[in-house]
Image (cartoon, coloured by chain):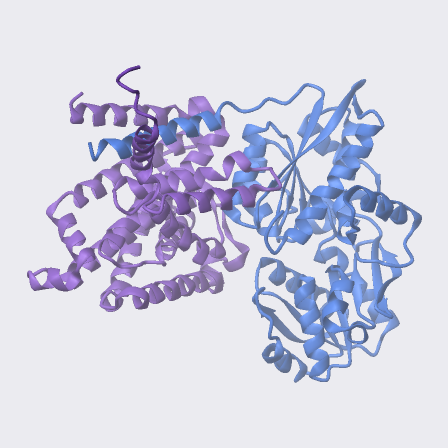
Amino acid sequence: MKQRAPLAVVALFAVAALVVAGPGRSAAADVIKFGISTPLSGPAAPWGIPHKQATELIFEEINNQGGLEVGGKKYRLEVVAYDHKYVIAEGVATVNRLIAKDGVKYISILGGAVAKANEEAINESGALGLTLAYAEGLVSPKNPLTFQCFPAPPETTTFWKWIKEQHPKIKRVASIAPNDDTGWWSVKVETAFVQKLGYEVVAKEFFERSMTDFNPILLRMLAQKPDAISVMASPAGSVGLIVKQARELGFKGRFVALHQIDSSVVAGIAGRENTEGMWVHGYVQTPLPDKLKSWQQRYTKRFGEWNATSIDFTNPAFAFVAAVRKAQSLEPKKIGEAMRTVEFDNLWGKAHFGGKDYYGVGQQIIYPMPFSEVRDGVATLLLQLTPPHN
Amino acid sequence: MPRKLGVSIVLAVLVILALLVPELGGDYYVHVFALVFTNVILAASLRPSLTCGQLNIGHSAFMSIGAYTSALLAKNLAVPFEIALLCGALLAAAVGLAIGYPSLRLRGVYFAMVTVAFVEVIRLIAQLWVSLTRGMSGLSGIPKPSLLGMTLTTRASQYYLVVGLAVVILLVLWKLEHSRLGLIWKSIGMGDNLAQSLGVNIARHKLLAFMLGCFFAGTAGAFYAHFIRFLFPPEFGFLMATNILVYNYVGGRGHFVGPILGAIFLSLLSEPFRGSPYETIFFSIAMLLTILFLPGGLITLPGKLAELKRWRAAASPTPSPAA
């Protein structure tokens, strides 16, 4: 008897598991399901939540206007979002679930490593991938249906040209970035770009994302007397600590953050005066163009709280809707073809997918990227620049 | 019904259900259950060590060794999957020997601390040896598993492979647990000084149990590498190691089936809640309830239910003879 009871439990569990599994749900005929695999919990949730919310808001607004018209028929847009917690196995499981169980053919993935881990799943399934990720090799001819939806280091580093022209006294540059693929690639791309411009790269340092005491690294860096410190790919919390500790060690130069970063978080940690003069890509508090003011109001009304990170995370939804309208088809391949040629409006102006000269394939989003300078603690729009490759 | 017949029927039903997953669930559940069986192997492979009373919180390191070895051999040297898998498992066992020989003389929390440190060492090697493992860029382009030169292209075929691996490994572990060797492991776990006084070489037996677990964890890791086809060092960190341990405790350490149940239960627990904003909360509550009400593990559920039934029968009023 002793042996039978546990086996009965196993049987019970197996049956329950299969009942839970059941056959895959089929999509309603007049609904377009758009999948999102993003970190909705854990340290990367501050990116994942606005990614999901921005997409939901855009789709809700289209649905309220009667839906998306394809081939004379109106479709309702629906977001199916799963939390990958920035864990690879979860990322693969969620994308697999979206494709195999939910019948989703269009998936937006946030996170470099997760997007890379799903390259083959996306390619094999023929789904359309809309990524928000920094990962070397992601935009490539081997991923014919993957479209990168926010500017990456090869695009944003163009801001160094403006620095060169406007601040010629800056000559020595030091870089600090997370010790992972995102950080390595960012520093690699930025170093190559600034060296071409004639800058001397005096230090390159990498830190573990959990690090809070940057003094040893900063002491090494500051010994090289840099005029500017680039914090490319570093999360806002880390940047706040880096800025604070570098200032305490006597650094008087500029901080350059050419990835999307909330400078108010940085100022909250480092102090307003320490953040003064910092250059940031993708985060603007003032003056907000009308389109962005409207987005801010709609977003705040819908979700109760404004999140500036949502601005660039609207790109996958805008690009998808524009490409479907152009393709007048729900076939991922046809939407992908339309994506390569369609021009659409995002919150910063006209956008399209390009970058063939750099990546070998025109699947990188191109639009006038905003750059701001922190003045009196406020990220103030300086200028908008188009990437060096179109 | 004779006991043996009952057991055979239950096992047969289980095997049929496992084989029916691709038919009933589709590709997604094939994927989920392939990972469930991988976790079953991992959980079961930790049991010999736990039976010997060694708290091993470093099992994911051996999974990682198996995964990277097999992936690199198959990717860079085109070694056939079967051989790559075996090499991964053997290297995990060899490293287990190297680590276990000096550290298995430690007891309780000291041994646990060594295993925790070892997880970090292996994770950092995978992270920092960029030229070999591609570090934090992640290792991609790992070939799909193959058998006798035939690539298993479909998820269903890969699922059947892991089911086969799990069945074989569970059979081996079950046989060992019910052999003289298993009795020795149990005796060491219950009181190693007493076992030693009876002439048992406890160091050798602990090492054997540890290495065996490492070998099977390496096997699970090798399959995982060729199934997920992307390896990322943080995946094999402390969290994964803890999960493997938790499978054993939530399932119940008192019976061979305990870790299997724990792995199935916890691997599937989040699935019904996936997509809900309260996914993590549901998962945590379900786990808390299990630990609170079934401290002996899920394996004690039938006993608890029977106890409840007896209690309710005793509490109901006895009909009067006059009625």
Does residue A358 sit above or below B41 in this rendering? below
Residue A219 in which image quadrant: bottom right
Horizontal side, residue A331 vs residue B79: left or right: right
Q: Which x, y percent locates residue A218?
A: 64, 78
Look at the image and tell me in which quarter the N terminus of chain A lies. top left
Closer to the camera in the image, A53 or B156: A53
- Marker count (numbered): 0
Q: Which chain is blue?
A: A
- Residue at 80%, 72% in the rendered image: A272
Closer to the camera in the image, B105 or A190: B105
- Residue at 77%, 34% in the rendered image: A59
Q: Which x, y percent locates residue B182?
A: 16, 48
- Residue at 80%, 67% in the rendered image: A279
Q: Which x, y percent locates residue A54?
A: 75, 43
Q: Which x, y percent locates residue B132?
A: 45, 59
Horizontal side, residue A254 vs residue B120: left or right: right
Residue A377 in which image quadrant: bottom right
Closer to the camera in the image, B135 or A294: A294
Q: Is residue A354 visible?
A: no
Residue A161 in which image quadrant: bottom right
Does residue B18 sit above or below A214 in this rendering? above
Does residue A343 sit above or below A151 in this rendering? above
- Look at chain B in the picture and name its colour: purple
- Residue at 20%, 35% in the rendered image: A2
Q: Is residue B268 visible?
A: yes
Horizontal side, residue A303 vs residue B79: left or right: right
